[in-house]
Amino acid sequence: MKESLHQLRRGVTQFSIRWAIRASAAIPIGLQRHIVISLVTRAGDLPMLRRKVRENMLLALGNDVPWQAGRKYFRHLGWLLSNSLAVFHNGLVGTPVPVEIVLDESVRILDDAVAERRGVVLAAPHWLGHELVAAVINLRHPVVMLVRQGPTPERSNRKLKWYNALGAETRLRPGRASTIKDAAAYLNILKRGKVLAITPDLLSGPGQGVETWLFGRQTRLHGGAFAIAISARARATAPALLRVARG
């Protein structure tokens, strides 16, 4: 029963994605963004959804989650979904996204690392909108995104169109790629002096991995990103902070 529900949710998700892409294709960016943001905001007003989001936040972050965090979550989710559709149809530079994502002064850490010309491993969490942020960083420094091959031809084509719209260089990673081939691809990118953006935020167990800070909290991450940087003699940096100017 649990597996059947999981498959049903995945099927509904894929249907919703296809429908949203088709329905928004001919709608002007401004109107399309307004519609999506309004729909997500209304969904966030549903007590059941708002309660579920808050429960998950409390599980992840503890009891000090502000009451307004759930509302901000849905507001940001509306911004993300509306702009993801806009970018998919019009390309990154054809949307307001490069203006609305503003990197703060910590991006200088990335600038200094790139200036060493040894390649940079940019480690970031799976934060809402991390791909849009990486695409904006690509307007500043060349970024390479490794893209896992989709499970079906339709999803693979859709994924490649999405990454092409972001404007960054992509490298397709086959579904059954070996660790050695993966490592060789990573090292080649870094030897070219480019930024390799990865999301290594799977937590490791106590006493394992590398101790670091994530969202102001001490945790332990798997050491792959750090091992890659050491092997290539590249720099490893934390993600540049950012704010959304509007949305």
Image (cartoon, rainbow, N blue to C red):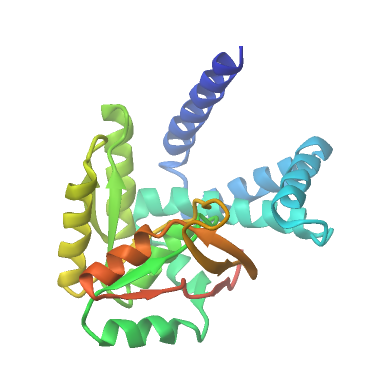
Whether residue 233 is situated above or below residue 28 in the rendered picture: below
Q: Nearer the viewer, residue 17 or 73?
A: 73
Whether residue 191 is situated above or below residue 95 in the rendered picture: below
The answer to which image quadrant residue 224 occupies is bottom left
The C terminus - image quarter? bottom right
Outermost residue on the front side: it is: 207
Q: Nearer the viewer, residue 77 or 91?
A: 77
Q: Nearer the viewer, residue 134 or 239?
A: 239
Q: Position of residue 173 (x, y in %)?
A: 24, 44
Q: Position of residue 21 (x, y in %)?
A: 43, 38
Q: Is residue 133 left or right of residue 217?
A: left
The answer to which image quadrant residue 150 occupies is top left
Q: Is residue 203 left or right of residue 52?
A: left
Q: Nearer the viewer, residue 228 or 153?
A: 228
Seen at 79% across and 60% down, the residue is 65
Seen at 20% across and 75% down, the residue is 193
Seen at 55% across and 17% down, the residue is 3
The N terminus - image quarter? top right
Does the rendering let one see residue 28? no
Whether residue 207 is situated above or below residue 52 in the rendered picture: below
Does the rendering let one see residue 119? yes
The answer to which image quadrant residue 42 occupies is top right
Q: Position of residue 2 (x, y in %)?
A: 61, 17
Q: Position of residue 106 (x, y in %)?
A: 49, 83
Q: Is residue 230 left or right of residue 109?
A: left
Labels in figure, total: 0
Outermost residue on the top side: it is: 1
